[in-house]
């Protein structure tokens, strides 16, 4: 290749479409410590995912000490925020999410440590070309039910997804799930 020539093996940039997106959450009956996955619904315009990296700047005398530029960064993990506006949804499953804890927690009292009580959720985002299985999920944001009245309600739900210590790469998600007998709509585990 000469200095002014273009490379010949370019990958053409293209649009990415995950397809219609289902949200499954672990809000069902708890058996042997595992909540049954239930279909929350279909998103209206997909989901918004913010992947927040937690890292600490490290300084040294070579980079100006504490007041200088970082010499390196220490990676400490990730927290993902997922916001979904629901088009078609189950009011029953949404009401279970509004409790902010899964069915294994029978008494929701002030001061409850949700993770220590195993009250967090599992959530699977499932599209034609998109799969994310979040295994440690909390509903920490307000559930916005708007509009209420004669117009159709499109709830917005915000989820905070923390790392699962079982994931070896410090990621809060993986792509592991099992579809039920009727495909993606027949239930998942």
Image: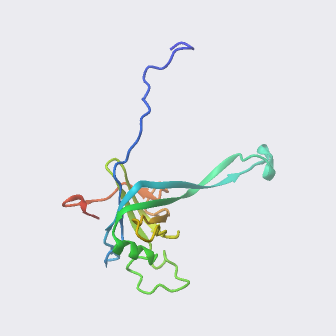
Residue occupying the point 53% across, 12% down:
2
- In the image, is 51 to the left or to the right of 130? right
Nearest the eye: 120 or 15: 15
Quadrant showing the C terminus: bottom left
Give coordinates of residue 36: x percent, y percent: 31, 72
Give coordinates of residue 150: x percent, y percent: 40, 69
Query: What is the total number of numbered labels drawn onto the structure image?
Result: 0
Residue occupying the point 46% across, 79% down:
117
Residue occupying the point 76% across, 48% down:
60
- In the image, is 113 to the left or to the right of 47? right
The relative height of residue 177 versus residue 149 in the rendered view (above or below) is above
Nearest the eye: 1 or 87: 87
The relative height of residue 122 versus residue 56 in the rendered view (above or below) is below
Give coordinates of residue 35: x percent, y percent: 34, 73
The residue sitting at the left extreme is 181
The relative height of residue 131 versus residue 136 in the rendered view (above or below) is above
- In the image, is 101 to the left or to the right of 189? right
Instruction: Tell me if I can see residue 46 in this picture.
Output: yes
Nearest the eye: 184 or 142: 142
- In the image, is 126 to the left or to the right of 79? left
Instruction: Tell me if I can see residue 31 in this picture.
Output: no
Q: Residue 102 appears in which quarter of the rendering?
A: bottom left
Q: Residue 22 appears in which quarter of the rendering?
A: bottom left
Specify the color scheme. Answer: rainbow
Give coordinates of residue 176: x percent, y percent: 34, 57
The relative height of residue 181 versus residue 28 in the rendered view (above or below) is above
């Amino acid at each position: 290749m000469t200095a002014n020539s273009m490379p010949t093996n370019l990958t053409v940039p293209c649009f990415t479409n995950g397809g219609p997106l289902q949200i499954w959450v672990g809000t069902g009956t708890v058996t042997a410590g595992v909540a049954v996955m239930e279909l929350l619904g279909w998103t209206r315009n997909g989901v918004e995912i913010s992947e927040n990296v937690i890292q600490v700047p490290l300084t040294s005398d070579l980079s100006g000490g504490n007041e200088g530029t970082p010499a390196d960064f220490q990676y400490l993990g990730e927290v993902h925020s997922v916001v979904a506006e629901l088009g078609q949804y189950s009011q029953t499953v949404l009401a279970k999410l509004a409790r902010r804890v899964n069915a294994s927690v029978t008494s929701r009292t002030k001061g409850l440590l949700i993770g220590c009580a195993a009250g967090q959720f599992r959530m699977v985002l499932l599209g034609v070309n998109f799969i994310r299985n979040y295994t440690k999920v909390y509903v920490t944001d307000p559930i916005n039910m708007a509009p209420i009245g004669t117009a159709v309600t499109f709830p917005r739900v915000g989820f905070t997804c923390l790392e699962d210590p079982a994931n070896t790469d410090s990621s809060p998600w993986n792509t592991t799930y099992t579809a039920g007998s009727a495909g993606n709509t027949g239930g998942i585990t």
